[in-house]
Amino acid sequence: MNKIKCGILGATGMVGQRYVSLLENHPWFEVTYLAASPRSAGKKYVDAVNEKWQMSTPIPDSVSDLVVGDANIVESAIDKCDFVFSALELEKDLIKKLEFDYAKSDIPVVSNCSAHRWTKDVPMLLPEVNSSHLDVLSEQKKSRGFEKGFVVVKPNCSIQSYICPMFALEKAGYKIDKAIITTLQASSGAGYPGVPSLGLLDNIIPFIGGEEEKSELEPSKILGRVVGGEIVEDNSIKISAHCNRVPVVDGHTACVSLSFKEKPIMEEIIKAWTNFSSVPQELNLPSAPKKPIIYSTEQDRPQPRKDRDSEGGMAVTIGRLRECKVFDYRFVGLSHNTIRGAAGGGILNAELLKAKNYL
């Protein structure tokens, strides 16, 4: 099989590095283009990333000598790759324009950035939940004059630890009407160098700019439906979120309390989670977890250090399901924020696009 050539925008940052690491020896995709800021442009990747490399494995030989392009110059990517993963770290308006400029140049964009998450004709994709949202791409291309290009985004990294389990319950017929969610978010979510060590060691920071708004609002688009070439939000679940930065390297944890229209029994909830499977599993996508939701019966799980790497870091681990004295039930969810919540989730989106003949 001839591999599809891909590029990475923002390749020297934390998410870009994770893309580089995860795409080594990928069965469908080959990294042929790397781009970053003007100060990195013109350098070999190994020199541009230098001491900033934060992955536990070495820089792959296949990309170490690639000369880094300027991500702001779209023309540099033409003929070097078939599509790009976007992990840009720029002002939101600049990212919006730049990602659409790539799409106009016939280069599809699979983005991790938040810039286009609320653009009506851009799918905010979580493949187990809303693969049908790809239907808006035909209208996106038509209305914006794109031929081969388009833009798809993934949701915020903390969403993964609870939205798939909530969707699995709704899919099984157990309608949720309210949720209170407290996230304990890993330090890697702040990028590198991120939060200064003296700010986080022996400490918890009860504020992450914009995170509570994303956690409360993004599920409405993810759970929405396509109508007239746009995604219409589903606001039937009211969510209140508290987002905290904690001294954990990788793995976002969410403590969730749920209220249902009609309260199911506990065994029904566990069955809905353990039996859950969706489009990525049906299509046998390379990065798809065989079990998207893993339910742990141990009373002190999930834990980031023990559970974040389940299914290659692509599964959500659930535990501590019990009755809630205010709402109906409560549980703890965990997902790997830089794999499932970032680069791995972006790669799964690209795999879905390829399987559905968009790439």
Image (cartoon, helix red, strand yellow):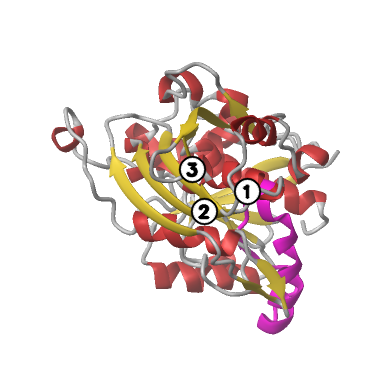
Residue marked by disc 2: 112
The verdict on residue 126 being magenta is: yes
Image coordinates for residue 61, horizontal then vertical, percent: 57, 28
84 magenta-colored: no
Does any portion of residue 254 appear in the rendered image?
yes
Q: Quadrant of the C terminus?
A: bottom right
Label 3 belongs to which residue? 328
Q: Nearer the viewer, residue 84 or 282?
A: 282
Q: CA distance from mark 1 to mark 2?
A: 21 Å
Q: Is residue 327 above or below residue 100?
A: above
The residue sitting at the left extreme is: 198
Determine the secondary structure under disc 2: loop
Q: Residue at x 62, y 73 (%)?
A: 232
Kindly identify which numbered label has been placed on residue 227. none
Mark 2 or mark 3, which has the lower sequence index? 2
Q: Would you name the residue on which mark 1 appears?
A: 167
Q: Amino acid at mark 3?
A: Asp
**Label 1 crowd bin: few (<14), some (14–19), many (20+), radius 10 Å:** many
Query: Of discs 1 and 2, which sits in the foreground?
Result: 1
Look at the numbered disc 1 and give the secondary structure of its residue.
Answer: helix
Q: Which residues are magenta?
A: 125-152
Please name the residue shown 28% across and 51% down the image. 208
